[in-house]
């Protein structure tokens, strides 16, 4: 059914049939794990369309190679497409989109918004021989890649030709691409290069309800574009939940189009009593599903990498034993989180063969837009990790918090993509009702330094009164401006400097960008790129089990002479050198490298990612700083022994100090550390090389975590004179930029 918001008349309706669901006793109830789980929500089901297959009405001239194969795939997928509520209402939807410059489109999960609407628009572009392309933004890279892959198949082209994607460090498009799925960060980057987005005739903001900082920023930019230089740009804001009014009001009461109906029902089950060990509960739930349910894969949502890695290890061990003893499918656990390489992430999409059941343990990166073919069951811990920025202190804290109801719906929606599904919520129904309805917009709890830099790069003078979708507040903006001034990205009059412009073009946070820029001036770019690459990969160094910690630290210390004295940044460089120069470049086998990583409790996959990020950063730096290979690779003659070179180390650490001046603490006579920004006491995290070194005059850290108290992570030893030198230099740079 397609209808306009209550303010508007209903355009058209198709028949909808509500089926009552017969309540059968469910094995979940008999479980030793969740004896009290019960079914409480029924989902309505829309009537499926049994219409005859039409001829595919898309253009045919885009099919280039392997034509026959692509065509066969198109035809088979067309059958599925036609059952989607969005496809069934194609004409009404397209009439509406054609006649409105901005539309807010609301549809249930799985109704076909993300895959179908862009294709209808693409057909229109071809039919009407129009110029321009279509951009579809996604909050996450996994979703962008997954959708582009699927849509290329449905459309009948090779991925990266007519349909492609662009995510950080991976661009799969060519000059013929007309439909591009891209992360919102990439669209913002394009905006920095092409102010009016000339390339596009349509921009679709998908999953707008996620309200990431970057989505909010794009909404603001789009509004100023259609009110200014691009009145012709068509904008579609797509969302699965009911924040519709807010989006509509922002775009001067743009019409809201509701596409009702989901294809498959998902039944929810709740616990009667809350569980306190979420990993244990999730494993038990999987075992129970495996024993009592029909074939079908399982998707589990956990808050973070640590819980996921633990769950994968336990499940794979348990599963082997159970499968030997009883006649149940062998469960194969797979992790899915942002820090994995794209190749590792893509493994979760491969089907498992034989009498096996795939169990994917994911963070919320699989929560929206992603379809993992074969998944019939979702198990939801109800938790997620968020970074909360305390702008008064200039510190970010990582917290595990309950999700919103909207997130819970999205998560359960992943079970009903190809057939009816079941969602097991590992919390009580009463707790579900207490959850906030929507996820709090990220901008309300984030550091806005990076967004402010983008706005400045774009030429916005009055940041406070810009077309914010949600204004982050004066205090937060002023903190962002101050931070940029400290980084010499802005001059005294608040204008962006050349340094600031370069910082905005690098695909990393402003603090790290400023470190790279300083390194390019100091002649240690190559070394600093290596360290920044390590820092850009989440959880490269894994947390050893408490009983192994001393042993692992001892092993790390043996390799890292410099790290022992100067801390974690130098240790990263030393580890990188061994991995890259001694293992990766020599003929060491993958197994040898894996074993080396295991001994030191380092993520092997993480290191492979580091190498890729490093390549990309080198490319950016070459372009930006006009460095040639010799400048960049000068340190590579022989195996650099960074730990023995004091001057080199101080040069490197001073570069980091330019980006992290605020993240420093001074050693006190009682051997505690006090932060330079607020005077608070801060402790060195036990995971740091400097944990038991109590004699540093000062420390610099790239991360702050708050658990029972404030901890500095990624800690380096600094001399207080360096701090003075860097602060003085910073002021001099700012002054010089003003006089220029
Ligand atoms: N990679 C895929 N593999 C198998 N089926 C897929 C895939 N991608 C999409 N589909 C099918 O197309 C349907 C519509 O997907 P689409 O992403 O367009 O829905 P949506 O309305 O955008 O939902 P959501 O907002 O939850 O992502 C899915 O329910 C599924 O049946």
Image (spheres, rainbow, N blue to C red):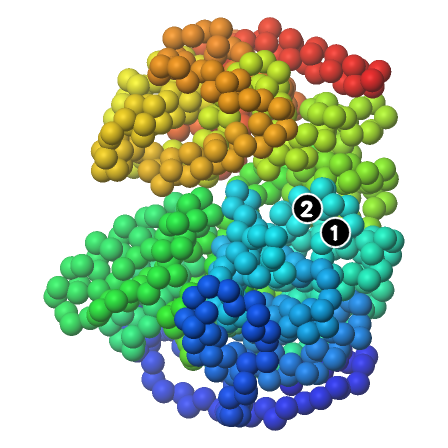
Secondary structure of residue under mark 2: helix
Classify 531 as above or below 590: above
Classify 273 as above or below 317: below
Please tell me the numbered disc located at residue 197: 1
Secondary structure of residue under mark 1: loop
| Mark 1 and mark 2: Cα distance apart in space | 7 Å
Quadrant containing the C terminus in the rendered view: top right
563 lies left or right of 488: left
Q: Nearer the viewer, residue 660 or 677?
A: 660
Q: Residue at x 82, y 29 (%)?
A: 495
Q: Residue at x 56, y 61 (%)?
A: 163
Classify 712 as above or below 468: above
The spot of residue 1 in percent (x, y) is 65, 85
Report the residue that reaches farthest toward the left: 325
Q: Nearer the viewer, residue 38 or 514?
A: 514
Dot 2 corresponds to which residue?
A: 190
Q: Residue at x 47, y 26 (%)?
A: 531
396 lies left or right of 615: right
Chain-order first, disc 1 or disc 2 = 2
Q: Residue at x 71, y 88 (%)?
A: 12
Residue 385 makes an appearance in the image: yes
Q: Quadrant of residue 318?
A: bottom left
Residue 692 makes an appearance in the image: no
Q: Are marks 1 and 2 in contact (CB under 8 Å)?
A: yes
The spot of residue 424 in percent (x, y) is 41, 69
Q: Nearer the viewer, residue 569 or 36?
A: 569
The spot of residue 203 in percent (x, y) is 70, 60
Instruction: Classify mark 1: residues with Cα within 10 Å, few (<14), some (14-19) or many (20+).
Output: many
The spot of residue 485 in percent (x, y) is 75, 25
């Amino acid at each position: 059914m397609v209808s306009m918001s209550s303010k508007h008349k209903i355009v058209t309706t198709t028949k909808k049939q509500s089926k009552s669901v017969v309540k059968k006793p469910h094995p979940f109830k008999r479980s030793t794990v969740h004896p009290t789980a019960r079914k409480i929500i029924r989902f309505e089901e829309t009537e499926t369309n049994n219409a005859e297959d039409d001829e595919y009405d898309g253009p045919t001239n885009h099919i280039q190679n392997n034509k026959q194969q692509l065509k066969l795939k198109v035809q088979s997928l067309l059958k599925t497409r036609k059952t989607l509520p969005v496809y069934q209402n194609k004409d009404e939807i397209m009439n509406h989109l054609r006649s409105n410059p901005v539309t807010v489109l609301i549809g249930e999960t799985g109704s076909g918004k993300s895959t179908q609407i862009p294709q209808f628009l693409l057909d229109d572009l071809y039919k009407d021989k129009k110029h321009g392309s279509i951009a579809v933004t996604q909050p996450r890279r996994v979703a962008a890649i997954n959708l582009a892959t699927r849509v290329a198949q449905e459309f009948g082209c090779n991925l990266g030709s007519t349909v492609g994607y662009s995510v950080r460090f991976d661009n799969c498009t060519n000059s013929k691409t007309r439909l591009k799925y891209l992360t919102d960060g990439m669209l913002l980057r394009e905006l920095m290069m092409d102010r009016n987005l000339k390339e596009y005739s349509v921009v679709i903001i998908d999953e707008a309800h996620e309200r990431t900082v970057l989505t909010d920023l794009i909404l603001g930019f789009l509004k100023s574009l259609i009110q200014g230089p691009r009145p012709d740009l068509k904008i579609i804001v797509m969302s699965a939940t009911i924040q519709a009014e807010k989006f509509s009001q922002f775009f001067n009461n743009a019409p809201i189009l509701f596409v009702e109906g989901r294809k498959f029902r998902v039944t929810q089950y709740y616990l009667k009593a809350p569980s306190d060990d979420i990993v244990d509960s999730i494993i038990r739930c999987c075992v129970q599903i495996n024993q009592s349910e029909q074939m079908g894969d399982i998707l589990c949502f956990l808050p973070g990498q640590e819980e996921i890695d633990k769950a994968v290890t336990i499940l794979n061990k348990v599963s082997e034993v159970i499968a030997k003893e009883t006649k149940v499918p062998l469960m194969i656990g797979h992790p899915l989180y942002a820090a994995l390489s794209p190749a590792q992430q893509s493994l979760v999409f491969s089907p498992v063969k034989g009498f096996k059941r795939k169990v994917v343990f994911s963070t919320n990166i699989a929560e929206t837009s992603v379809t993992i073919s074969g998944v019939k069951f979702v198990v939801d811990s109800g938790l997620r990790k968020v970074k909360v920025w305390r702008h008064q202190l200039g510190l970010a804290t990582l917290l595990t918090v309950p999700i919103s109801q909207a997130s819970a719906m999205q998560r359960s929606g992943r079970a009903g993509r190809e057939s009816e599904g079941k969602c097991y919520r590992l919390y009580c129904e009463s707790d579900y009702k207490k959850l906030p309805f929507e996820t709090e917009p990220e901008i309300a709890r984030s550091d806005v330094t990076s967004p402010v830099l983008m706005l400045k790069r774009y030429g916005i003078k009055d940041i406070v009164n810009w077309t914010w979708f949600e204004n982050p507040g004066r205090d937060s903006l002023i903190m962002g401006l101050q931070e940029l001034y400290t980084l010499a990205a802005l001059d005294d009059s608040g204008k962006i400097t050349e340094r600031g412009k370069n910082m905005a073009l690098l695909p990393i946070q402003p603090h790290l960008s400023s470190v790279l820029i300083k390194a390019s001036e100091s002649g240690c770019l190559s070394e600093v790129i290596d360290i920044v690459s390590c820092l850009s990969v989440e959880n490269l160094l894994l947390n050893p089990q408490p009983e192994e910690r001393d042993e692992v630290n001892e092993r790390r210390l043996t390799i890292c002479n410099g790290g022992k004295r100067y801390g974690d940044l130098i240790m990263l460089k030393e580890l990188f050198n061994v991995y890259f120069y001694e293992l990766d470049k020599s003929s060491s086998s993958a197994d040898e490298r894996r074993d080396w990583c295991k001994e030191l409790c380092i993520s092997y996959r993480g290191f492979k990612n580091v190498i890729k990020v490093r390549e990309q950063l080198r490319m950016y730096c070459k372009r930006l700083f006009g460095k040639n290979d010799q400048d960049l690779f000068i340190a590579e003659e022989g195996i650099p022994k960074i730990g023995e070179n004091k001057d080199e180390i101080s040069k490197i650490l001073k570069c980091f100090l330019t980006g992290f001046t605020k993240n420093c603490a001074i050693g006190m006579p009682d051997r505690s550390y006090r932060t330079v920004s607020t005077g608070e006491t801060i402790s060195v995290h036990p995971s740091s090389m400097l944990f038991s070194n109590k004699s540093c005059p000062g420390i610099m850290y790239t991360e702050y975590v708050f658990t029972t108290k404030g901890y500095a992570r990624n800690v380096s030893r600094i001399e207080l004179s360096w701090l003075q030198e860097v602060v003085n230099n910073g002021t001099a740079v700012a002054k010089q930029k003003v006089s220029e």
